[in-house]
Image (cartoon, grey):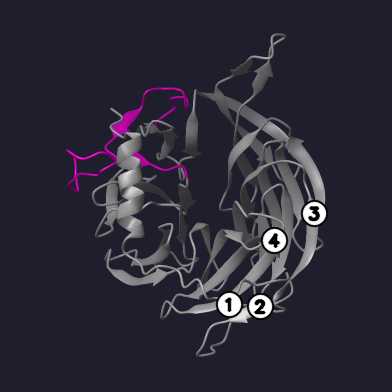
């Protein structure tokens, strides 16, 4: 049963925001895309190529410290995912777009219905897209059809399967190997695993989003910024305290990475080696040891940020600042010590999604 109210959600955000110092209003904004601001003391910075997007895709080269390409999409971007070969898959209101992540050119638009989330199989052979269709009736009213999961075959460059799930789906993850479990998360916070040959639309087995870790008598909210890494899915859950619900897609077992208080959760990322989980808490980043659950660092961000992504070498995380002067910005933070390393301004866009191209 959903127990979140708008008042409770606001309380979660305010509780998290009060943990960090207020922004220093005297700090100057970055004025141009090409200018990079480096924190002191100076340390070796990241050298990744980062995709950031709203309705425009910006390519940010952190080695050069500047924006190197801009692609107008004309569609609201929800998510970006990179395959190991550097191909970028963009989930947007206009469907799924495929980009050459080295030439930064659009290759295809194989799905044209609005796409909420994308997941790339570990072997890189298939891509699944969580999508839905909106029908505009003659009287201008809109009908949102049930969400479905489309499977795109990379080799043939076509959609080979389409399975209906249900209404208002936040996230869906396919099972990891034979005998595993699929996972479905709905907008109202219901989590279920599905085993055997049952379809994604089946009731499956319900999962407690609080994972038996306390706070059951308090309001909670499961956020849509869930991710899969290998055989595990990571679901951010706002509550008292907030946490990241971890679902093993092989066994169906659940556990939780506990935060020590209520935070607004705006993104989750897992390091390439799976050892560290980074959580964007709106006004900062919390870095957690995935094995022990120990919080390694709490990092303040100078302004509220959303989304989070690991550098290709796992040594830094990137967050998106939605408002920065005349646009937005991307921040790079060191995982080793939680130090701010670099900030690059994005002129004229508010980045809602970001992803890092593999090296």
The disc at residue 85 is: 4
Contact flag, marks 2 and 3 (Cβ < 8 Å): no
Report the disc number at residue 71: 3
Camera-side mark, 4 or 1 = 1
Q: CA distance from mark 4 to mark 3?
A: 20 Å
Q: Which residue is mark 1?
A: 342
Q: How much space separates mark 4 and mark 1, taking CA atoms?
A: 26 Å
Identify the residue under disc 2: 36
CA distance for labels 2 and 1: 7 Å
Whether 221 is drawn above or below 143: the answer is below
Q: Residue furthest top?
A: 139
Tell me which label, 4 or 3, sits earlier in the chain. 3
**Residue stretch in magenta:** 195-224
Residue at screen point 64% across, 14% down: 141
Overall secondary structure of the magenta stretch?
loop
Q: Is residue 201 magenta?
A: yes
Left or right, residue 295 beside residue 357: left
CB under 8 Å between discs 4 and 3 = no
Q: Residues within 10 Å of mark 2 (few under 14, many from 20)?
A: some
> Could you tell which of marks 4 and 2 lies nearer the N-terminus?
2
Q: Find residue 178 and report its horizontal and vertical position in percent.
A: 45, 41
Quarter of the rendering occupied by the N terminus: top left
Pointer 3: residues within 10 angstroms few (<14), some, or many (20+)?
A: some
Residue at 48%, 59% in the rendered image = 304
Q: Are marks 2 and 1 in contact (CB under 8 Å)?
A: yes
């Amino acid at each position: 049963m959903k127990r979140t109210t708008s008042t409770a959600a606001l309380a979660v955000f305010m509780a998290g925001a009060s943990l960090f110092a207020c922004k220093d209003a005297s700090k100057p904004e970055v004025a141009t895309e090409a200018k990079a601001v480096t924190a002191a003391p100076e340390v070796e910075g990241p050298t990744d190529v980062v995709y950031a997007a709203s309705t425009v895709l910006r390519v940010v080269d952190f080695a050069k410290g500047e924006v190197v390409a801009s692609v107008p999409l004309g569609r609201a971007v929800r998510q970006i995912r990179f395959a190991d070969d550097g191909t970028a898959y963009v989930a947007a209101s206009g469907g799924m777009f495929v980009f050459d992540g080295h030439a930064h050119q659009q290759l295809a638009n194989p799905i044209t219905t609005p796409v909420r989330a994308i997941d790339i199989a570990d072997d890189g052979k298939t891509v699944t897209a969580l999508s839905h269709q909106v029908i505009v009736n003659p009287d201008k009213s809109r009908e949102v059809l049930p969400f479905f999961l489309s499977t795109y075959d990379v080799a043939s460059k076509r959609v080979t399967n389409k399975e209906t799930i249900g209404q208002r789906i936040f996230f869906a993850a396919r099972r990891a190997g034979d005998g595993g479990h699929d996972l479905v998360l709905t907008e109202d916070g219901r989590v279920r695993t599905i085993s055997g040959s049952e379809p994604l639309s089946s009731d499956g087995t319900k999962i407690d989003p609080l994972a038996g870790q306390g706070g059951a008598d308090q309001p909670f909210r499961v956020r849509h910024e869930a991710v899969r890494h290998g055989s595990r899915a990571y679901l951010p859950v706002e509550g008292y305290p907030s946490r990241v619900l971890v679902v093993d897609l092989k066994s169906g077992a659940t556990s939780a990475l506990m935060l020590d208080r209520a935070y607004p959760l705006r993104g989750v990322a897992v390091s390439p080696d799976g050892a560290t989980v980074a959580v964007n808490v709106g006004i900062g980043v919390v870095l957690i040891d995935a094995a022990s659950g120990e919080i390694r660092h709490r990092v303040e961000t100078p302004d509220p940020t959303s989304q989070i992504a690991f550098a290709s070498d796992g040594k830094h995380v990137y967050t998106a600042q939605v408002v920065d002067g005349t646009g937005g910005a991307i921040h790079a933070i060191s995982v080793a010590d939680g130090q701010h390393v670099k900030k690059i301004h994005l002129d004229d866009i508010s980045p809602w999604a970001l992803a890092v191209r593999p090296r």
